[in-house]
């Protein structure tokens, strides 16, 4: 059977959070054996531009797991990008996820990079040894006129040198399959990892879906309404929902699954173990089904 890639995303703890929280997250996921862990990049004025490289360094050198560093374009000068690439190289990072980033209220973009494709091309020219990943949007990016238009722009990123795509969260696999078909028809033939965001709260799910222009399908809406005042049950339902999404993706030959951990190792573990069971790769020999594993969701 085709074994898809599995990868995880973590983010640097907030400035006022205890430094050890990232170790709690990594300790909780290290034995899952992901193909890589990616680390997000914050680009606001108050963001710490060294945080991504420091955490990537920890992942590579303390946990022995390949790391992918996110990097955003809008609020960076070429000099700052060069500095980030130097830090990534020292950390032993194997690939950079090149992003445009969102426009921030009250902050003016530097103006040296307009789109992610500009950053992809720049990294390719500066560091031909680094792999360059990019983002994609099964339902279309929220600023694009249409999905077709967004895919035309995506092709520019691929032509600039991106060799691997990771999707924005989506809750209806049909959106992913439609996008994958359209991307393929547009000549985009690089691996596409499906980004899966487990539901952990009703309000946060609705907020995130609205921000990303992602649709909440009716069967998920039913769960959000049914369990909105019972967080434990909602989290269990969220784990089951993510497992069902992943099972279906695997059955449809997905290239890879990228779990947005939101730095919640317990949820990530439960989903992952179910996926291993599903794929028959469960190293612990556990045959716990989705319902069993989700029963003690926290
Ligand atoms: P782009 O590819 O530049 O696209 C942005 C918009 O411009 C789209 O509407 C596109 O259709 C349009 N466009 C692109 N090229 C052209 C062109 N040549 N001409 C006209 N229009 C064009 N944000 C962070 O701040 N930090 C992170 O770590 C981070 N990680 C992410 C990881 C993933 C997997 C994903 C999916 C998103 C992530 N984001 C992150 C969010 C991301 O920065 C936003 O979604 C942002 O709005 C778009 O970034 P992009 O790289 O997709 O932009």
Image: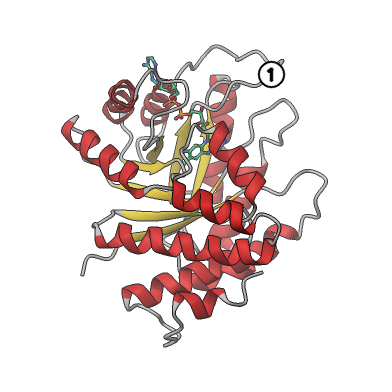
Picture quadrant of residue 180:
top left
Residue 294 visible in image: yes
**The C terminus, quarter of image:** bottom right
Q: Secondary structure at mark 1?
A: loop
Q: Residue at x 35, y 22 (%)?
A: 146
Q: Residues within 10 Å of mark 1 (few under 14, many from 20)?
A: few
Answer above or below: position of 239 versus 93: below
Answer above or below: position of 87 versus 73: below
* Side of 8 where 154 appears, left or right: left
Please state the horizontal and vertical placement of residue 75, each as a whole percent of the image.
60, 21
Q: Residue at x 66, y 35 (%)?
A: 49
Please state the horizontal and vertical placement of residue 64, each as a whole percent of the image.
51, 65
Residue 63 visible in image: no
Query: Which is more toward the observer, 92 or 40?
Result: 40
Q: Residue at x 41, y 20 (%)?
A: 144
**The N terminus, quarter of image:** bottom left
Answer above or below: position of 95 versus 122: below
* Side of 280 where 25 appears, left or right: right
Picture quadrant of residue 162:
top left
- Where does label 1 land, which residue? 105
């Amino acid at each position: 059977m085709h074994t898809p890639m599995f990868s995880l995303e973590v983010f640097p703890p907030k400035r006022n959070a205890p430094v050890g929280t990232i170790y709690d997250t990594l300790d909780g996921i290290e034995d899952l054996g992901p193909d890589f862990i990616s680390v997000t990049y914050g680009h606001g004025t108050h963001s710490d531009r060294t945080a991504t490289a420091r955490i990537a360094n920890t992942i590579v050198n303390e946990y022995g797991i390949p790391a992918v560093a996110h990097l955003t374009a809008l609020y960076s000068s070429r000099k700052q990008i060069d500095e980030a690439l130097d830090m990534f190289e020292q950390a032993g990072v194997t690939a950079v996820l090149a992003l445009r980033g969102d426009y921030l209220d009250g902050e003016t973009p530097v103006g040296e990079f307009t789109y992610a494709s500009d950053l992809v091309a720049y990294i390719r020219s500066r560091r031909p040894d680094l792999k360059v990943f990019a983002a994609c949007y099964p339902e279309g990016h929220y600023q694009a006129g249409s999905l077709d238009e967004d895919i035309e722009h995506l092709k520019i990123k691929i032509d600039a040198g991106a060799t691997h795509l990771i999707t924005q969260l989506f809750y209806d696999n049909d959106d992913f399959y439609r996008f994958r078909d359209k991307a393929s028809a547009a000549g985009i033939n690089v691996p596409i990892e499906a980004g899966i965001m487990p539901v952990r709260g009703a309000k946060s799910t609705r907020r995130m879906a609205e921000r990303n222009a992602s649709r909440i399908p009716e069967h998920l809406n039913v769960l959000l309404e049914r369990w909105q005042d019972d967080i434990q049950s909602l989290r269990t339902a969220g784990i089951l929902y993510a497992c069902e999404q992943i099972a279906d993706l695997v059955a449809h030959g997905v290239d890879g699954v990228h779990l947005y951990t939101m730095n919640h190792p317990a949820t990530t573990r439960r989903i992952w173990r179910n996926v291993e069971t599903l794929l028959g790769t469960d190293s612990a020999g556990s045959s716990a089904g989705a319902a069993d594993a989700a029963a003690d969701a926290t």
